[in-house]
Image (cartoon, coloured by chain):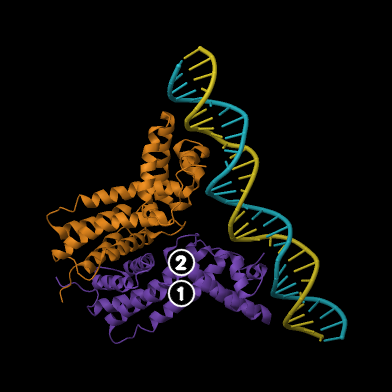
Chain colours: A orange, B purple, C cyan, D yellow
Amino acid sequence: MNENHTNTPMGSSLSQNASTFDTERAKSLRVDAQRNRVRILDAALSFFAAEGLSVRIEEIAHHAGVGIGTVYRNFPTKELLFEAVIQRYQQKLVEDAESLIDHDDPGEAFFHYITRVIEGGAANKALKAALSGSEIDMKAVASGISNNLRDVLAKLLARAQQSGSVRADIGADHIKALMVGTLLAIEHSAGEASLPTGIISVICDGLRTQPS
Amino acid sequence: MNENHTNTPMGSSLSQNASTFDTERAKSLRVDAQRNRVRILDAALSFFAAEGLSVRIEEIAHHAGVGIGTVYRNFPTKELLFEAVIQRYQQKLVEDAESLIDHDDPGEAFFHYITRVIEGGAANKALKAALSGSEIDMKAVASGISNNLRDVLAKLLARAQQSGSVRADIGADHIKALMVGTLLAIEHSAGEASLPTGIISVICDGLRTQPS
DNA sequence: AATAATACGGAATATCGATTCCGTTTGTCA
DNA sequence: TGACAAACGGAATCGATATTCCGTATTATT
């Protein structure tokens, strides 16, 4: 049917392809179609964030003020829609990290960043689903995030470690896993508003250079 | 149909009821039925642990060497079967904790316990599903675990804190959330065998009484 | 051993939600 | 403004599973 579906087994380059595809494609869309595409993405973001992957396409369509068919014309699959939504979020996270790389105090930058990501993502089921790779089998998304996020994280971490504020025996993978875990831990503690702070505190303290 | 379905909104006493129900009920079963019931629970445990809630009932039935109908006669719902499986696991966790309450070194007992639970549960998707309460909406299970586990955890924690080995600004809820998160963090890091150790280490260090 | 009471297996059914299809509507362009 | 292409909406289709049902087989009871 369509061209752009090489469905590469490895997802390394997929995120690049996908956004390129999306962007270029949008230019040749009729104005109403462009508007709808954005609406769909917005609706999808809020619903995925609030309820995770289980929301029905129909619901997203309705909230976006379009029919199901329109959703499918833009995103041939629920999974692809999800990917598109996550791509956006990922983009923000990465840019966010990049803006901190030149910060004066590497340690502060590092802790500031992971705290920010965790607090920001705590209420976002879409992000958690994407990070934890659970539900649906979206290897592409997962590794897309992995690669980009991992890179900036690695930089922030390395600087923080060199400055002596973060223990040296861990790597970017640990951080990534810990962020996912913390995110999910916080979700699990839904209710007690005070828990998140304590949990983040424990994690950060555990990451600091140990006294011994 | 059956009697024992008060479907209490609050799950406080549910776990007790359920296991009582299960046990007493079993006594009046025909011998072959008793055997099948156990087989089903065993099969369900291994499948749920390995693949989470998504396994098909048919698969569990087949592995247990019985027909689908037999599974349903014992557990009217997939959810109830899952609950029964989790109840067992929970039981073990609680007993495990209780056996450590009188340990000489409260701090050691505490860290030993959470480490053990996490390492033991790392490969168990059923436990993670139960703890994180994701997928299916099993409030009963979740709160059942919450209550029992929370109680023993609270005891272990209190003693560890009194002995000065664990920071005083956190509670059992934090621990529970952290355990869930760590479990999921480890799942996410599948692959790198070295990550789990590092992650657990970070958490434990973060929980220790801080030097400052 | 015969009968009743229980359990069993698994085909048939029910449900739920993603995805397809096509007649209708709207935007673009001459 | 008229004609054509591009989009639209949403009913109908498809697929996957949980769950029901009932004729058969097994265990318990006499």
Circle 1 crowding by C-alpha within 10 Å: few under 14, some 14–19, many from 20: many
**Residue furthest out toward the bottom:** B104
Q: Quadrant of residue B195?
A: bottom left
Question: Disc 2 marks which amino acid?
Answer: Ala
In depth, the one of B92 and B13 nearer the eye is B92
Q: Is A136 placed above or below B19 here? A: above
Question: Disc 1 marks which amino acid?
Answer: Gln
In depth, the one of B34 and A136 nearer the eye is A136
Q: Earlier in the sequence, mark 1 or mark 2?
A: 1
Q: Which mark is residue B130?
A: 2
Circle 2 crowding by C-alpha within 10 Å: few under 14, some 14–19, many from 20: many
Q: Chain of mark 2?
A: B
The answer to whether residue B23 of the structure is visible from this angle is yes
In terms of secondary structure, where does tag 2 sit?
helix
Q: Quadrant of residue B31?
A: bottom right
**CB atoms of marks 1 and 2 within 8 Å:** yes
Residue for point 44% across, 44% down: A4
Residue for point 42% across, 77% down: B93
Q: Position of residue B46 (x, y in %)?
A: 52, 74
Q: CA distance from mark 1 to mark 2?
A: 10 Å
In depth, the one of B7 and B58 nearer the eye is B58
Residue for point 55% across, 72% down: B44
Quarter in which the C terminus of chain B is drawn: bottom left
In the displayed structure, does residue B75 sit left or right of residue A165?
right
In depth, the one of C29 and B168 nearer the eye is C29
Which residue has dot 1 on it? Answer: B90
